Structures are given as C-alpha cells and as structure tokens.
Amino acid sequence: MKTLFTDLGLIEYRTAWDLQERLFNHIISLKKSGASATDNYLLFCEHPHVYTLGKSGSDNNLLLDMIQLQAKDATFYRTNRGGDITYHGPGQIVGYPILNLETVVKGAREYIEKMEEAIIQTLRVYGIHSGRLTGATGVWLDTDKPGRTRKICAIGVRTSHWVSMHGFALNVNTNLQYFNYINPCGFTDKAVTSLSAELGRQVNVDEVKTLLAARLAAVYNLDLTRVEACELEKIQ
C-alpha cells in the first residue's frame, strides 16, 4: 500500500497530535464510506521537552508539579493512547504510523510486535542487541539481567476501526536526565538508555531515521512515498 512519509522535524506535541487525529479520522471516514483501500501515513518528528500520560497511566508517575515542569521548560499532556507516562524531547525519534491495519497485519499484537522488530533490527546495525520484555511493550536491553534491564524505545498506540495512531519513541541522543522526573511507563525498577549512551558517542539522527523508515516499510510491507508536511496539511 502507498504510505505517505514525512519528517516533521522539531514540532510541538499538540501540533503533531492534531495532525495525527486529522489523518486518522480521514482514513476512518474513507473506510466507513466503503473504501477497501486507503493511503497510509508515517510521520517522524522530534518534540520539545514534553511528558505524555496514556489512558491507563497514573498521575503519580509524574514526579514534578506544574511549576517544576515550567522550570524544566517542559509541558504535560494526557493522551488517548495506551500505556503510562513517557518523555519526549530533542534527540529522540518519535514515529507515528497512521495505518489502515486491515492492509498490514492480522491483529493488534502483531502490529506492536512488528514495530518492535523494526526497531530491534535498526539497533542491530549499530551492534546493539535488544529485545522484548515479558509483560511490557517497547524495546529493551539486557532483559535477562535483573537490575540491568533498561528501555531504549517506548511504544504506546491507539487503534479504532482498525486504524492506528501514536506510536514509538526511540532514544538516540536524548537527554536522559528528563526521565529522572517520572516513573517511565510506570516502572520504578527499570532504567532508560539511549543509542548514544550505549555507544559512548553522539549518533547521526538522520541516519537512524533512514534506517528505521526502511525497516518499518519492510516489516509492514509499506510502499513509502516521501512528501512534504504541507501536502498532509491539505488532507481533511
């Protein structure tokens, strides 16, 4: 299926969320009108410092009050995705696949597993062995070593009418200090890491985006067509 792909660059969380909602509702509208096939969308971006809380999350997992948030130059949103609390910020690749899932997977679990697999394959290019953690979504390191297990990519999605939105956040050159102000994804006993922390050097984010987009296209069998963000703004 044709999938329109764009990199939004550094963009406010609310602005990206509004764009997602518009594309998400566009696909649902087409499906309700009887369309058997629709375009899909894949958005990459980075966000200014922001904490987002999923539907099943607890406010107690944000360890800052609103005044402290402002002091850290961060914002906070309650969202309609699954999962608990997470952080987004510069140096982190945030991916939002907005897909007609009937054309790419057989179930929601398969959708998540393929997303994880694309990230695992991308990290392998850099010599990093990663995997899944039983009972949790996302991509993790050292899952077989209690006390050393750490998350490198968070995943939280929403699906309705077999259409997806929200997605993943892969830490590349992320300032990990911002994770100290939350219980990431609700965990109090798991650490967070990044590609640059594991490699001991800064990583070219654009290079990672290129590798990751190719692997997402492969696992979901997507035909990516690069477009400018302004093209997606025209879709109602």
Image (cartoon, helix red, strand yellow):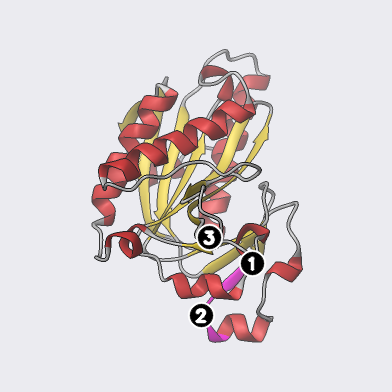
Q: Residue furthest front?
A: 145
Q: Is residue 69 magenta?
A: no
In this view, the residue in front, 53 or 63, is 63
* Image depth: mark 3 or mark 1 in front: 1
How far apart are the two marked residues, 3 and 2, measured between alpha carbons? 14 Å
Label total for image: 3
Element class at badge 1: loop
Report x, y in % for residue 104.
51, 21
Residues at circles 3 and 2 in contact by the CB criterion of under 8 Å: no
User: What kind of element bears circle 3?
Assistant: helix
Q: Residues within 10 Å of mark 2 (few under 14, many from 20)?
A: few
Query: Where does the C terminus fall, quadrant-wise?
Result: top right
Q: Which residue is mark 3?
A: 13
Mark found first going from the N terminus, 2 or 1: 2
The amino acid pointed to by label 3 is Tyr
Magenta stretch in the rendered image: 71-76
Is 147 above or below relative to 20?
Answer: below
The image position of residue 43, as x and y in percent, is: 43, 44
Label drawn at residue 56: none
Q: Is residue 87 above or below residue 181?
A: above
Front one among 82 and 146: 146
Residues under labels 2 and 1: Cα distance?
Answer: 19 Å
Residue under label 1, please give it: 183
